């Protein structure tokens, strides 16, 4: 098997799985129970939370455990909207967001909220001047992903944060799902940040919303004691422990891992540019872990299944997309419907090898010849 879909989900690190199993086996009590076993379990959660806080440079009381990025994004957006709608009902986002951003924003739009999309340049980068023009007295939230999950565009989050910070009634939420472990971002001026463990070799079903301590949210889930008042439910101790371990491991030797991925990205890009009908959609502002291309005249799912015959696995869009064959992100970037309707995503990891890339190019070439001959 040759896996090139790391941006959808990553394989679980063996050490992370071991931490999960040990916690699940040795700490059987509900962490909220008052007896000795419960206190012991709760102590392990506190230690894990302290480690996560230290690794990310945030406070322990700013960490809310969720089931993953989709829940974190919903909690951040709906939670702010419900808590602060007395200040206003204006939200700003971009055309390059994940469906778990558009979903809650679309829901709020039906409740009377006004949504604006900030302009981006030809590279897909947010216009800072337009953002400042859009923020007004009743703007309560700006939600912008640090890295687009389909093309890999990296936004200037630190600069955006400085602009939003000028407006004390407005909060800044960042979907960091594709950033953690790949890109270094300062959390100082960010009010809310979402991420999920399965994107960095952790287990599915656990994620975080970082919420700065002075900010209030209306919870999505009410009732019952937990690690925080903002998310009720029995704390998932083994998952929390595994999240802490996954985060520590992915941040180790981060620069070395990044350099490896950059080299593979450049190699693949140079090889793919040799094919006449291939257009590279990812640009110099994208993280190297994501390489989005279009094979003109070829349906994405057709190429996906053709490569699958060689036991190679890629993605057509994000795994959580609606299934529409036209990529909204690629169209927003290129304004080219043909490219948007023929795009595929190749996503890399520090685990990816040069040999796997060679196999991909060879197999892609065979698929390309067969499929484009029908054009």
Image (spheres, rainbow, N blue to C red):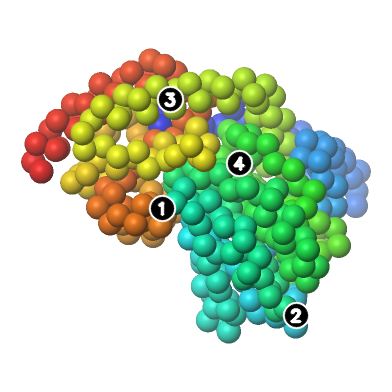
Of callouts 2 and 3, the N-terminal one: 2
Reply above or below: 245 against 140.
above
182 sits to left or right of 281: right
Residue at the spot of label 2: 87
Of callouts 1 and 4, the N-terminal one: 4
Mark 1 to mark 3 CA distance (whole Å): 21 Å
Residue at the spot of label 4: 179
- Mark linked to residue 333: 1
Mark 2 to mark 3 CA distance (whole Å): 47 Å
Residue at the spot of label 3: 266
Mark 2 to mark 4 CA distance (whole Å): 31 Å
Local crowd at mark 3 within 10 Å, few (<14), some, or many (≥20)?
few
Mark 1 to mark 2 CA distance (whole Å): 33 Å
Of callouts 1 and 3, the N-terminal one: 3
Judged by depth in the image, the label closer to the viewer, 4 or 3, is 3
Q: Residue at x 31, y 24 (%)?
A: 271
């Amino acid at each position: 098997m040759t896996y090139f879909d790391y941006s959808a989900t990553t394989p679980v690190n063996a050490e992370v799985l071991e931490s999960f199993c040990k916690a699940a086996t040795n700490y059987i009590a509900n962490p909220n129970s008052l007896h000795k076993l419960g206190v012991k379990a709760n102590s392990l959660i506190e230690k894990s939370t302290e480690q996560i806080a230290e690794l990310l440079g945030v406070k322990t009381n700013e960490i809310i455990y969720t089931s993953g990025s989709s829940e974190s994004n919903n909690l951040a957006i709906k939670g702010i909207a419900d808590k602060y709608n007395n200040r206003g009902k204006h939200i700003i986002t971009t055309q390059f967001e994940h469906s778990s951003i558009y979903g809650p924003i679309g829901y709020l739009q039906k409740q009377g909220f006004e949504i604006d999309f900030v302009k981006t340049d030809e590279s897909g980068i947010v216009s800072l001047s337009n953002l400042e023009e859009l923020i007004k007295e009743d703007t309560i939230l700006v939600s912008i992903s640090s890295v687009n999950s389909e093309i890999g565009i990296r936004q200037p989050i630190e600069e955006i944060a400085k602009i939003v910070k000028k407006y004390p009634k407005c909060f800044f939420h960042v979907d960091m799902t594709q950033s953690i472990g790949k890109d270094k971002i300062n959390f100082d001026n960010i009010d809310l940040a979402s991420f999920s463990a399965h994107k960095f070799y952790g287990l599915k079903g656990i994620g975080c919303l970082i919420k700065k301590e002075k900010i209030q949210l209306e919870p999505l889930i009410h009732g019952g004691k937990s690690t925080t008042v903002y998310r009720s439910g029995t704390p998932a101790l083994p998952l929390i422990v595994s999240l802490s371990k996954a985060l520590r491991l992915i941040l180790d030797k981060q620069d070395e891992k990044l350099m490896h991925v950059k080299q593979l990205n450049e190699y693949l890009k140079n090889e793919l540019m040799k094919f006449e009908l291939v257009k590279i959609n990812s640009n110099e502002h994208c993280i190297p872990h994501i390489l989005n291309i279009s094979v003109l005249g070829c349906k994405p799912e057709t190429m996906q299944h053709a490569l699958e015959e060689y036991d190679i696995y890629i993605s057509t869009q994000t795994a959580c997309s609606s299934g529409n064959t036209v990529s909204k992100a690629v169209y927003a970037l290129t304004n080219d419907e043909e490219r948007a309707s023929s795009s595929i995503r190749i996503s890399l990891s520090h685990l990816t090898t040069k040999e796997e890339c060679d196999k991909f190019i060879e197999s892609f070439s065979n698929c390309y010849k067969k499929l484009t001959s029908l054009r």
